[in-house]
Image (spheres, rainbow, N blue to C red):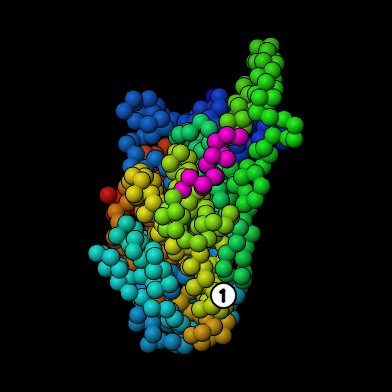
């Protein structure tokens, strides 16, 4: 389909959705528009039509779906993952200029002396792999042999808004499609009764300071057709807005209404041939199916007591990170393509020793339970799980400089991402940082490299998943070079 035609159709679809024609632009299924790039070359067309490959794949995938656990605010890699015991000898000493190299800092650090603060928490070696982990994560420490720790992550973003936007959409500039939207566009749906892409922000968190807002463009579709944007689940009331029938309307009445409206729409389509009419019909049918599929998905009454206990006591509270982790597993069972959890509260410029333990308690047991639950149900092998924030934290302190009240500033030069399942080699570290956890010294991994790797595990060549917009074949990985991290793939 020509790009101009696609734009016209999408504009009409947005108008109809805003006028209340369906459940909302996020609750959509695969419609009349194709899910492959309009500019696919003959080689990709051949691969896509190969009966041995899933639709949209360029080569055999190792994963079918993604669960992305986004720690908004940026956890401290020095205090959790990147163990630097020698820093204990340098407390309150200036960070050497040979390390900082005059690199850009935030306005919160500019003009201040950069004094080293080691981690105030213990570390120990865990698992058969002997990986060092913070004592703040006792449950996740039991899963290290499933995990790959990418210690050499880096990005250009030094503040939260551009950092989160870059991590979720591939660029700091707002308006581009999100990771899940690209996957929905490239691979299509696995479950016709649920959205391809579901988002679940935590309703509450333990860290009470410096909590930035989340915004729907982090899971938006950008210039892609809006059927690919994420569906954000609510923590109270209907999981999806307007899911329930109005008072006095039951399922039978709704079915008859849709049948009659569908007849009228099909008649109208026969008269004028506008494909947006077929899009509207598909939206309405998807909304009707979700009235059954979503309540079944979110009702955890059929979960065993053992499973609930594994996720911890917070699993019984709607909107908690623990409940969302359990729902993520239920979504994986139902083949939702991309599941994204957001947990805020990690921005610790001061009082890190007070606030970090609570944040870790929020996510430690549920994240470990999610990995165990996926594994015991045979889902981990084809589910890629990613745990990361938008950047890291500095080795130098902020706030009162003592071991009980220190904080850390934003640090894009290096941080740690955790990956598991879906073709990932477990029980390993990849990349390395200097003795100050300040610079990457081996195997650097940019955020766009992580995106390229995620796509590759799902059977997609990141250079071939494109969409024409503003004179450019747009990609999730953008125009800068990006590479697949072959060393972490099993």
Residue for point 62% across, 49% down: 234
**Magenta stretch, overall SS:** helix
Q: Quick check: is 163 in the magenta stretch?
A: no
SS category of the residue bearing label 1: loop
Residue 463 in percent (x, y) is at 42, 41
- Mark 1 highlights which residue? 349
Disc 1 residue crowd, few under 14, some 14–19, many 20+, Cα 10 Å: many
Residue for point 38% across, 49% down: 374
Residue 140 lies in what quarter of the image? bottom left
Please identify the residue farthest to the left as the structure is shown.
128
Residue 462 in percent (x, y) is at 41, 42
Q: Is residue 166 above or below residue 192?
A: below
- Is residue 203 in view from this perspective? yes
In depth, the one of 273 and 370 nearer the eye is 370
In depth, the one of 165 and 387 nearer the eye is 387
Q: How many marks?
A: 1
Residue 5 lies in what quarter of the image? top right
Looking at the rendering, the stretch of residues picked out in magenta corresponds to 291-303
Residue 357 in percent (x, y) is at 49, 73
- Is residue 152 in view from this perspective? no
In depth, the one of 221 and 440 nearer the eye is 221
Residue 317 in percent (x, y) is at 57, 57
Q: Is 274 situated left or right of 135 in this image?
A: right
Residue for point 73% across, 35% down: 246
Q: Quick check: is 298 in the magenta stretch?
A: yes
Q: Is 110 situated left or right of 147 in this image?
A: right
Residue for point 58% across, 43% down: 231
């Amino acid at each position: 389909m020509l790009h101009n035609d696609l734009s016209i159709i999408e504009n009409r679809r947005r108008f109809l959705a805003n006028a209340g024609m369906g459940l909302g632009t996020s609750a959509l299924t695969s419609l009349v528009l194709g899910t492959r790039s309009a500019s696919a070359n003959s080689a990709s067309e051949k691969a896509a039509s190969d009966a041995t490959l899933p639709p949209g794949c360029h080569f055999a995938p190792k994963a079918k779906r993604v669960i992305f656990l986004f720690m908004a605010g940026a956890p401290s890699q020095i205090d959790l993952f990147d163990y630097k015991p020698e820093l204990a000898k340098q407390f309150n000493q200036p960070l050497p200029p040979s390390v900082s190299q005059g690199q850009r800092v935030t306005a919160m650090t500019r003009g201040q002396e950069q004094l080293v603060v080691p981690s105030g928490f213990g570390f120990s070696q865990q698992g058969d792999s002997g990986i060092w982990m913070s004592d703040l994560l006792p449950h996740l420490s039991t899963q290290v042999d499933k995990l790959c720790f990418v210690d050499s992550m880096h990005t250009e973003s030094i503040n939260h808004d551009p950092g989160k936007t870059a991590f979720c959409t591939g660029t700091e500039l707002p308006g581009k499609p999100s990771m899940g939207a690209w996957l929905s566009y490239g691979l299509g749906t696995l479950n016709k009764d649920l959205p391809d892409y579901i988002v679940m922000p935590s309703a509450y968190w333990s860290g009470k300071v410096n909590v930035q807002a989340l915004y729907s463009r982090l899971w938006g579709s950008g210039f892609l057709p809006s059927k690919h944007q994420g569906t954000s689940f609510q923590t109270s009331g209907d999981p999806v807005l307007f899911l329930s029938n109005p008072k006095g309307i039951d399922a039978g009445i709704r079915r008859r209404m849709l049948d009659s409206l569908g007849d009228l729409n099909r008649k109208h389509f026969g008269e004028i041939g506008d494909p947006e009419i077929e899009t509207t019909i598909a939206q309405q049918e998807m909304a009707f199916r979700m009235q059954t599929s979503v309540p079944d998905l979110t009702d955890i009454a059929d979960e065993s007591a053992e499973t609930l206990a594994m996720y911890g006591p917070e699993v019984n509270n709607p909107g908690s990170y623990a409940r969302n982790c359990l729902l993520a597993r239920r979504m994986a069972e139902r083949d939702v393509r991309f599941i994204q959890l957001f947990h805020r509260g990690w921005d610790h410029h001061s009082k890190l020793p007070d606030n970090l333990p609570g944040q870790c308690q929020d996510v430690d047991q549920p994240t470990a339970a999610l990995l165990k639950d996926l594994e015991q149900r045979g889902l981990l092998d084809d589910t890629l799980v990613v745990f990361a924030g938008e950047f890291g934290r500095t080795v130098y302190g902020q706030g009162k400089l003592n071991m009980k009240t220190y904080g850390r500033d934003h640090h894009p030069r290096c941080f740690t991402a955790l990956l598991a399942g879906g073709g990932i080699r477990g029980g390993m570290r990849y990349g390395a940082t200097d003795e100050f956890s300040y610079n990457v010294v081996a195997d650097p991994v940019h955020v766009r490299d992580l995106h390229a790797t995620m796509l590759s595990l799902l059977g997609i060549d990141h250079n071939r998943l494109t969409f024409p917009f503003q004179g450019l074949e747009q990609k999730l990985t953008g125009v800068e070079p990006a590479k697949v991290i072959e060393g972490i793939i099993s």
